[in-house]
Image (cartoon, coloured by chain):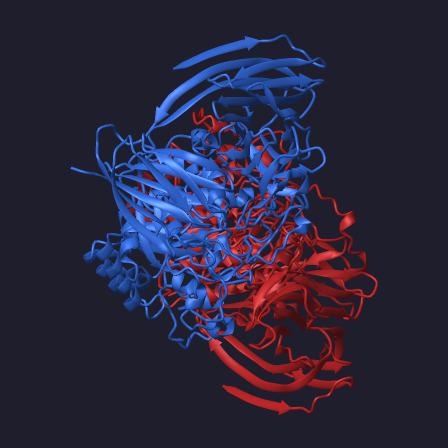
Chain colours: A blue, B red
Amino acid sequence: MKKILTVCLALVTGTLVAQNVKSPSGNISLDFRLVEGKPSYSVTYKSKPVVLSSLLGVKLKETTDLASGFSIDSIGNHSFNESWKPVLGEQSSIVNHYNQMTVALSQSAGRKLNIIFRIFDEGIAFRYDFPRQKDLNYFVISDEVSEFNLTGDHKVFWIPGDYDSQEYVYNESKISEIDNDKLNLNNGIALKSIGGRYVVQSPLMMKSQDKLYLNIFEAAVVNYPVMHLNVDTKTFKLRSQLVPNAIGDKAYLQTPCVSPWRTIMVSDDARDIVGSKMILNLNDPSRIDDTSWIKPMKYVGIWWEMHVGKSTWDFAGSQNAQNAATQDLIPSGKHGATTENTKRYIDFAAKNGFDGVLVEGWNVGWEDWFGNWKEEVFDFVTPYPDFNIKEVTDYAKSKGVKMIMHHETSGSVANYERRLDRAFDNMRKFGYPAVKSGYVGRIIPRGEFHDGQTMVNHFNFVARRAADYKLMVNSHESSRPTGYSRTYPNYIAAEAARGNEFNAWSTGNPPMHETLLPFTRLLGGPMDYTPGIFEIKMNVYDPKKTEQVHTTLAKQLALYVTMYSPLQMAADLPENYERHPDAFQFIKDVAADWETSKYLEAEPGDYLTVVRKDKKSDKWFLGAITDENARKSQIALDFLPKGQKFKAIIYEDGKDADWQKNPKSYNIRTVEVTSKSKINLVLAPGGGTAISFEPVK
Amino acid sequence: MKKILTVCLALVTGTLVAQNVKSPSGNISLDFRLVEGKPSYSVTYKSKPVVLSSLLGVKLKETTDLASGFSIDSIGNHSFNESWKPVLGEQSSIVNHYNQMTVALSQSAGRKLNIIFRIFDEGIAFRYDFPRQKDLNYFVISDEVSEFNLTGDHKVFWIPGDYDSQEYVYNESKISEIDNDKLNLNNGIALKSIGGRYVVQSPLMMKSQDKLYLNIFEAAVVNYPVMHLNVDTKTFKLRSQLVPNAIGDKAYLQTPCVSPWRTIMVSDDARDIVGSKMILNLNDPSRIDDTSWIKPMKYVGIWWEMHVGKSTWDFAGSQNAQNAATQDLIPSGKHGATTENTKRYIDFAAKNGFDGVLVEGWNVGWEDWFGNWKEEVFDFVTPYPDFNIKEVTDYAKSKGVKMIMHHETSGSVANYERRLDRAFDNMRKFGYPAVKSGYVGRIIPRGEFHDGQTMVNHFNFVARRAADYKLMVNSHESSRPTGYSRTYPNYIAAEAARGNEFNAWSTGNPPMHETLLPFTRLLGGPMDYTPGIFEIKMNVYDPKKTEQVHTTLAKQLALYVTMYSPLQMAADLPENYERHPDAFQFIKDVAADWETSKYLEAEPGDYLTVVRKDKKSDKWFLGAITDENARKSQIALDFLPKGQKFKAIIYEDGKDADWQKNPKSYNIRTVEVTSKSKINLVLAPGGGTAISFEPVK
């Protein structure tokens, strides 16, 4: 259903021109204005101002900016309403419904810029479109003008605008209180490149004093750097801050081309934002024709045992570069990725119905991998002497288990790219269907940042090249996704936020962390958060340790539902699961690809309750989590199909559960329910509830 | 034959320590001194000072320099005298004979630096050796201290210290007259990055007032940037200037490691320098076990016709990026690399006994390739619609001709590396044994220079990776070779200096140019100079053109002998050769791999006469060239084997020949000679003589 209207306007320079476009529901309204040749926009929600007049445009290196001196050539409008089927997702069908306005601008010298606005029911988006034109072919973006002029001193959940990492705990404050200089940066992040005192990252989740939920983000970041936001803490005006390259440039482009979409979601109901598919909708459809090889995966792996200090990635156990250089490594006996240990995980996966086994530390280089800005660390094909890749992959195959490859690059992207085909050939040779890639450390090419155009292009390139090999990709320490998994659905997951691992060896993630991620990081695509930690306190591994996961055990189960990903790790050690087979049953049962999802309760930073229906069965799963505060609520089960009885297995916090004092207290009970039933959820501080609903025959 | 002596010295700081080492002949003497903890050296030749006391050492980023505060731990001496057989070369066996002194230094904090000196009969070399040590593992070189403190205001042949190009005409002046600000830079070089007003490149060829020939260069530049030389034009002190990376660093290293060798050749006979194999000797032996696939090649190609404007690299003939972007290119009819034209060259090669045919412009991208700092220009595998790669390669095979692949990167090395395996796979698929690579344009990763560590590593990586595929490499616009072809003999040639092509469309190369290159560029390895131009004046292609090759026709023949390369192009068009079959015979006959070579006459910038014996036959070939001045000389043929008669076919300048007025005048005569004969060489201004000696049975 497309409707195209084109309004041709007389050339009007130096005067005010205003055009309006509304969301399909009519709740959101956007005004475009051209005042004295400068383009700007403003947004209202249910007639309340949300974004005040904010400038638009881009600055170009060594040539006239595309930010002023404009007149309007034409304004075109059209409506779009279609649905599409994601290969994997929170729902089997996604509606993409918006009204679009395209403003065609030109400068007197003849250069052209189009600004395209799309207004959805849950927010607005705009992008710059640089059409083919005589006087603009190659150009370099030195700055983007895009402003987000907010109406007040909103509550904001923010992390510093670091060009190399998003693995921060969220700060909750007023906009006026944003100040990176006041942060405690002893937070376990090794490499930090904060782009300014008042620069924060998007997705930026906010709540206004009149209880509007606001989210500023971007979609379809392709051949462009990540946008951070420079905040004027006095006027509440946010300005785009693009991540520079090694020599300070932002983006190298050639007409015809487009910028990413800049997005502003707004609603008086937080569930509209957490459940929005706007970011995916703003990306191009899948470019992979045959997607039959793209599958959800639940997996276990040799990974958490390194985080808790039980074993090491490196064979020599020394992390000593000079030891590594001798070529005659002395095994420490603590190496995790041995053939024998891998077989143990394969057995565990096979026994418990997991699809895959990840093995980190299988390949040579780990003695010398971190913090040295070293270009040739890994070759991605040579196993340690105690890891027999043929034996392991043959064994996995005999057990019906898939192996997940691991490619840590230590940030040396130049090295990874020149070895990528060999690495993927090796995966194909041994039948690995998926790779977890890692980018810990300063980037090589030196001077580049994780969030710059070069690296954005790299992450996207790896996804595309992996698709050529029919491989799925799960990137860690990449720039955060902005919906590219719609276009390359083999890019099944990414980390790109502070994951569960930080709880093992740093100040960790406060209980509110997981209630916020679905409002921020997850809007752009699935996260490999690695939930499922049953041994919550690290002192079980070493009495001197004080670290812990900031959770109850039941909440770890609920995360499999609240943190959508088609790639879900059961991150804890097999022996820890074997001590709690009853609770482990939920992880075994829970689906990873969904027919439908409904967000029942949501308040960013406080709580989240979501229920989802498995795509392959009639089972439903519910996840409810809270922050550091205990919480009670009653859930109506009217999402269940009418007239059908279900057995609800409820995995809840024990009466005395508390993330700090008694995190492992949980209770499992079974009740029979229908769509008319209600269930009381009782969540401990830092707790959660997971429920599986199985149809009763 | 190795002899190792180690002298242990008491720790001596703050006082003068001197140690001397001499060349095997005793003519060259080097003194090492440690004065107040600072290392320095000086050099004499036949007791005359050549290099006055000059500092040594390196500066490190963010840590204490390795340039002062030293005491001597030990001084070790040994002698070395071996010969080795290059796979391809000017001679079948090379003597590597030197005396070595290793000075082991340490600082009070414990850090160690060794300086290794090698004294050959034709010069000295030194390098920094960073041994494995507790307090120095990873480090960044921010500057090199290395000085070359010369004794006077020598005559010097110099080109500016450009980080991106060596394709300059040599300037001949006194050291005191070096000044990049006074250069006319309208010289056909598109990309220039000159590193300072008084910075020049090595190899730097000089002649002192007392007629000593001096050459400063480097060898084995591996994992290190190119060294340029910063000249103090008043004191004649030269200082190392390393090429920086995108963020100003010079080299990223890890102990144990070594710097390249810094070399100073000196002799009172210029032939000792032009014939020296010191640079090759200072490189590591071949790392390729089976070298049977590395073969000399004489070739023709679709190349010069583009330079003279007869055809184009690009299919659309527009060099219009936006045209390219439309995906529906309109052929101009001038595209050179058509199937039909390629077959014509294959026929010509087969008929005349050439090994190979190069085809440039065969692949899509040329409409949009130059000057845009564009990352994805070429994919290195997709032919233009009028170039049928299968048909062409099948045809070549049927004619016994090898195809030479062309990979122009336009400087986008990031793109080339991520596509290199695909590109090499494609070559293997179609049976190409060799690739000519090109690096015209600003480097991507952006901010890097052609001569930085990153790019040095790239050029060496491509050679190594090509060896994995058994492919030979001929790089154009690379950093200039420093003998790495000894280690990877499949790196058969490079351009990396101002080649013959500049004569077609710029001010060109003055007649002295080729008399100098063997004293400079060729010391580091073979050059693909592309000689053999018979149609010397460009006005034959377009009456408006005034450009010409600065040569006589006979000199073009002589270049096949004077410019050593195992890869030699007959660069002119087939139809131009067909008009001069008698002269063309020399190009058909001349060898490209040699049993022995003798430099008979040599004066840098003035003239050069060399004779070489074919490795596969008993034929000898002589080349003699001069600069803009006519020249006569008499050559004794005592290099020929005694008692054997030879037919000498002499290709010489016509009586009225002159590079400017009458370049195509030549004369061919045949005489019978023995080792007792003498031949009078009569060279026109800008002229030359080529002679083939065939044994008379």
Q: Nearer the viewer, residue B26 or A222?
A: A222
Q: Vertically, is B409 above or below A146? A: below
Up-down relation of residue B606 to residue A613 (above or below): below
Give the residue drawn at x 55%, y 42%: A453
Out of A72 and A531, give the one closest to the viewer: A531
Q: Picture coordinates of residue B403 (x, y %)? A: 38, 47
Q: Position of residue A197 (x, y in %)?
A: 68, 46
Tell me what residue is drawn at x 45 percent, y 74 percent: B643
Judge from the rendering whether residue A696 lies leftward or rightward of residue A534; answer left or right.
left
Q: In this image, A522 relative to B29: left or right?
A: left
> Percent x, y for residue A110?
64, 19
| A168 vs B671: above or below | above
A482 or A202, nearer to the observer: A202
Identify whether B176 is placed above or below B151. above
Visible residue check, residue B589: no
Q: Does B608 sit left or right of B95 as displayed? A: right
Is residue A304 visible in this depiction of the protein? Answer: yes
Which residue is nearer to you in this view: B295 or B91?
B295
